[in-house]
Amino acid sequence: MVTHHVTRGYRIFQGFNAVILAGVVVATLYPFVNIVAQSFSDERYILSGQVNLIPKGFNLTTYQIVASDPMFWINYRNTVVYTVVATLIAMVLTTCYAYVLSKRHLKGRTFLIWVAVFTMFFNGGLIPNYVLVTSLGLKNTIWAIVLPNAISVFNLLVMKAFFENMPDELEEAASIDGLNTYGILWRIVLPLSKAVIATMLLFYAVSFWNSWFAAFLYMNEADLFPVTVYLRNLIAGATGAEGAGAAVADVTQAASNIKSVTIVLTVLPILAIYPFVQRYFVSGVMLGAVKG
């Protein structure tokens, strides 16, 4: 049996490392816990800066204001639909494009890579994009949100690197067994790519869930808005009412902690999903970035 002597220097390193990591955890969690506390606190305690990690003057006024509005639930449903549809389309397009780019023998591969990379640094601009989406008849539809952001070049390059690291012998053996390109991708490559797929799913889902500007720009019907636009409008309305000297208590309460409630309501679904994909997260990114 082999025993390893732990040196004094290594113990010091472990202690130092533990302190640094604990500090990072505290620095990461503190703002979020503070936001949650503010979302359940009374407005006078928030305005006086007395809320830290524990709610003061506990109340659910703002949550009740938001939850009692039928439009909130309509917009929340829209967000779920937009996120699911957009993520599925983005994953299909990104996976297919990345798999093609991972083949070094492909003619025109370098050109296709540069086409993708070019879009990371240059785009048509806000007005040309708006004119294009409008001329295609995509305004006030889900496709105005989904199609312009269907492929993230960063995600594409990560998946491409992951596919490149897979042994060529696997695909050669599958090809000898009679599988065509689509069969190899579906039955061989994808089952071995769960880590990177889960990571990309998380990246895309978070991106589309938090997106609001595209809907704000391309949609002008309230029942088509995602919940992020609803909450943005609620913040603007509450803040404007407070600035105008509104005397209604509910409006004042909403203006004081609406930002906290907004963050909590927006982040909860992502927090619920993250534990299921967390174990794939690190390995997915590292395997797509490091040559094996």
Image (tube, rainbow, N blue to C red):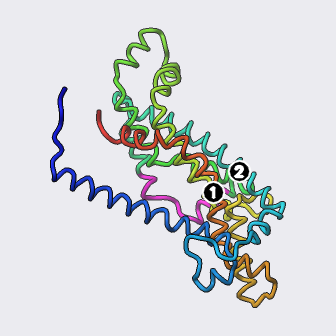
Q: x and y percent of residue 18 in the render? A: 32, 56
Q: Is residue 247 left or right of residue 210?
A: right
The amino acid beneath tag 1 is Leu
Q: Helix or strand or loop: what does disc 1 sit on?
A: helix
Q: Answer few, some or many: residues within 10 Å of disc 1's Cα (few below 14, many 20 plus, some between 14 and 19).
A: few
Q: What stretch of residues is rendered in magenta?
A: 118-133
Q: Quadrant of residue 128?
A: bottom right
What residue is drawn where x is 67% and y is 67%? 261
What residue is drawn where x is 71% and y is 88%? 243
Q: x and y percent of residue 56 in the render? A: 65, 76
What residue is drawn where x is 41% and y is 9%? 176
User: Disc 1 vs disc 2: Cβ atoms closer than 8 Å?
Assistant: no
Q: Which residue is mark 1?
A: 132
| In this view, 175 is above or below 137 | above
Residue situated in front as seen by the camera: 80 or 53:
53
What residue is drawn where x is 73% and y is 85%? 242
The amino acid beneath tag 2 is Ile
Name the quarter where the C terminus is drawn: top left
Does label 1 or label 2 sit earlier along the sequence?
A: 1
Residue situated in front as seen by the camera: 191 or 59:
59
Q: Answer few, some or many: residues within 10 Å of disc 2's Cα (few below 14, many 20 plus, some between 14 and 19).
A: many
Q: Is residue 169 left or right of residue 3?
A: right
Q: x and y percent of residue 112 in the render? A: 42, 40
User: Is-magenta flag for residue 179?
Assistant: no
Q: Which residue is mark 2?
A: 142
| In this view, 202 is above or below 177 | below
